[in-house]
Amino acid sequence: MADLAGRSRAPLEDDFERDLHTEHQLLNMGPSHPATHGTVKFLIELDGESIVDLDIQVGYLHRGFEKECEAGTWYQAIPYTDRLNYNSAALANLGFCLAVEKLIGLETPERCHWLRVLAGELARIADHLTRCGAGCLELQAMTPFLYGIEARELTWDLLEILCGARVTSHYIRIGGVKHEMPASFPAICGTNIAKIRALLRDFDEVVTSNRIFVDRLKGTGVISQQECLRYAVTGPMLRSTGVALDVRKDEPYLVYDQLDFDVPVGEVGDNYDRYLVCVEEMQQSLRLVEQCVEKLAKLGPGPVNSFDPRVRWPAKGRVFNQMEELIQHFKSVTEGPRVPAGEVYQAIESANGELGFYLVSDGSAVPVKVRCRPPSLINLAPMPAMLRGAFLADLIPTFDFINMVGGECDR
Amino acid sequence: MQDHGSRALRRLLDRLPEAVRGTHAERGDATALVDPERVHDVLRLLRDDPDLAFEMLTDVTCVDYLGEEPRFEMVYHLYSVAKNHRVRIKARVAESAPELPSAVALYPSANWMEREVWDLYGIRFRGHPDLRRLLLYDGFEGHPLRKDYPKEKRQPLVGPRN
């Protein structure tokens, strides 16, 4: 055989295979696959090891979130939001409660803002740790997963002290938070944050420049800035392409405009950049947690719930002794706030991107519509386009670092 | 009709006044109610106008106002990264012909979200490349987020088909 310049060369494998009869193979992966942390089915058309086409079938965890919310009171929707993104429940609580408060036009005390940011940032760290830890596990690396999970346990310990529950915290309520931060929290927070930082350092040493890890992640699952915007992709996935879009900076809610933090961005938008963005975001969130604890100490004791009679729950002592308070308590429990008629959209920056709630009320105690804009679902949509032509093995890290969370994706 | 200080609404009223049926900016959210057949034109204007630059179709959903006519209301949320502003576009769709043009050609993000709306509300999108159910399975009867679909209703789960 001769090349274009006329020199002879050894026949390549391709030359032999060209006339070989081959056909594409259809592969079902999931819904419960050991290499994915999420219940989702991939229907993959394969040419050898290359992905020709990919169909993603979601919905295995569909519980009818919106239908359930439309059947209960506004308060009764909050526990359902816990179960949207179960890695960072406090952020979903926050999104929903901010939306309801915007609809009512409710002012909340300053101290409650700081507590909300504190809970939210702890939840964000837990979410990113799950993404990075489980991502390593699915690339056959057990050690960093254990580092990540240990750090997540420490984060959940903090959430437990703050909220009373580890995973589905149900801490942020309409008009405030469940209760004041316990007095023991700042000290334990200091020790745990130091431990988390040490674990993140260990994690970084094992993973970030690990040859196998870098080879699996660099240059795989690439998405361009333009494509991200066209697919409305947000969060670390968009930031990995170099767009510094963060709802906390662009449309600051709560007290994010008073906090000092950076928005890390990547360059090429591959899995490795997504990993680096998440790792840096955890460091930023730790900084935010420290700032919140410091500020809460400086603020001193104060109310953490709104005094607005529409959402206020009277103190227990008064409920048992005063008729009006008893009636108020009964009304609060049985039907909750009556939200003025109207519609509202409130976006917050969740761990996966823009988590939005679109609420419609007709003035009664039951919502007409509770729409959750799920970043997990919307970030998953461009995955077939990202993987066409890639190797089957690239699907695993790409899916991991998109971080689809079934509860939020399928609702 | 007023623009309520929103650049997007002002431009919309300038360029496509006949398509806009109403505007409001309650609680700071600029909103326009438009003719369902003109949704495509409205979204194209919002995307392509350099002063508006709505690169992102953030959210597509639907609301069922049972008992009102037209019954359904499609809701589109757009966001501009370059200009950092938002707008909400709504269009009423009748129950007798629950159909309107798809936005997929303009915004690929509409693909899955319109599939979800078809799945849960039964609104059809003309020109959608792949209008299958998204969250529920083939063989599911009805559209569960419609207000007349009983919450307690159970359906047998059929096995997967490839």
Image (cartoon, coloured by chain):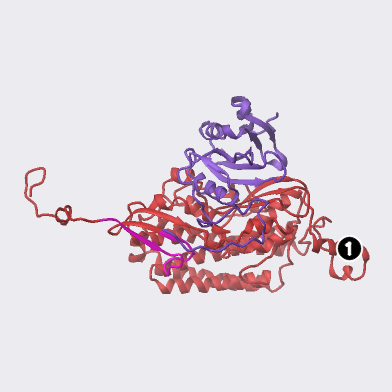
Chain colours: A red, B purple
Part of the protein shown in magenta: A23-42
Kind of element beneath mark 1: helix
**Image position, residue A66 (x, y; %):** 64, 56
Asked if residue A35 lies in the magenta stretch, the reply is: yes
Q: Position of residue A47 (x, y in %)?
A: 29, 56
Q: Closer to the camera, B154 or B70?
A: B154
Q: Left or right? Give the position of A310 relative to A111.
A: right
Q: Nearer the viewer, residue A352 or A204?
A: A352
Q: Quadrant of residue A260?
A: bottom right
Position of B104 with respect to A256 (left or right) is left
Quarter assignment of residue A61? bottom right
Q: Give the image location of residue B114, x and y in percent.
A: 54, 46
Say which amino acid is labelled 1: Ile
Query: Nearest the camera: A188 or A33?
Result: A33
Residue A324: x and y in percent read: 92, 62
Q: Is residue A324 left or right of residue A23?
A: right
Q: Residues within 10 Å of mark 1 (few under 14, many from 20)?
A: few
* Residue A37 sits inside the magenta stretch: yes
- Badge 1: chain ID: A
Q: Which residue is mark 1?
A: A327
